[in-house]
Amino acid sequence: MSGRVENKIAVVTGGTSGIGLATAKLLAAEGARVFVTGRRSPELAAAIEQIGHGAVGIQGDVSKLEDLDRLFTEVRKQAGRLDILFANAGTAEHLKIEQVSESQFEAGFSANVKGVFFCMQKALPLMPDGAAVVLNASMWTIKGIPGFGVLSASKAAVRSFARTWANELRERRIRVNVVSPGPVRTPSIEKATGGRENAERLLSELSKDIPLGRPGNPDEIAKAVLFLASEDASYVNGAELFVDGGMVQI
């Protein structure tokens, strides 16, 4: 029995941990050949070993255009096309208004907005008609969680990109959708909050507003990305899929 993305070529940015790694593993298990990016070599090598299925790791930072050029040059060389793009890489810091420096503001928008935009721009020449793009945003653009203003604003820009791009690419039938996770237990939230204890405290507090009463896990988000990237979502375009236990619905 064939997988849901059998023989597809996929790129997952920021695929060394959390949602990116879980998605890369699932896409590979479902038949795709996956190219994964990460900023640090040891973590990238470990991720490729976990993903298996012939996955390829390419070290790079999505906020650096030369790294994106190198990524897609390698995809062209090794695969010749790109069927699925999951623009997942990003950054977050838990800082209130008065705590945010100019450099922290610029870093957030550079990774979360500039990185997504130019990743898409440089991926397009490799995409055949009918390709699928999934952008990783956040339910925090709706809820307005204190301390995540820069993250929320940058992810709102990502949501806006999907609406525009779905229209711009209509003649090529390239679908562009957004997955917006709720609170998820990942290494990135530990980094954003300054450690596991702080992350667990925040997740526990946020869970009070989640109808399912708990944070999500990366595998649950990965399944939503797989759906949006596959032919199961062939009539889904320009949409935002909240995977948040119902948090933004109440």
Image: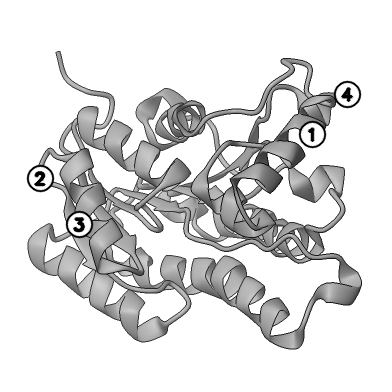
Q: Residues within 10 Å of mark 1 (few under 14, many from 20)?
A: some
Q: Which residue: 33% across, 79% down?
A: 67
Residue lying farthest to the front in this orientation: 197
Position of 108 relative to 50 (above/below): below
Q: Residues within 10 Å of mark 4 (few under 14, many from 20)?
A: few
* Image location of residue 56, percent across then percent down: 16, 55
The quarter holding residue 112 reads bottom right
Q: Residues within 10 Å of mark 2 (few under 14, many from 20)?
A: few
Q: Amino acid at mark 4?
A: Ile
Left or right: residue 222 compared with residue 181: left
Lower position in the chain sequence, tag 4 or tag 1:
1
Q: Amino acid at mark 2?
A: Gly
Question: Residue 54's mark?
Answer: 2
Marks 4, 3: nearer the viewer: 3
Callout 1: SS: helix
* Residue assigned mark 4: 250
Lower position in the chain sequence, tag 2 or tag 1:
2
Quadrant of the image containing the N terminus: top left
* Residue assigned mark 1: 206
Q: CA distance from mark 2 to mark 3?
A: 13 Å
Is there CB contact under 8 Å for labels 2 and 1?
no
Callout 4: SS: loop
* Residue assigned mark 3: 45
Q: CA distance from mark 4 to mark 2?
A: 43 Å
Lower position in the chain sequence, tag 1 or tag 3:
3
Q: Amino acid at mark 3?
A: Ala
Position of 61 relative to 204 (above/below): below
Position of 85 relative to 201 (above/below): below
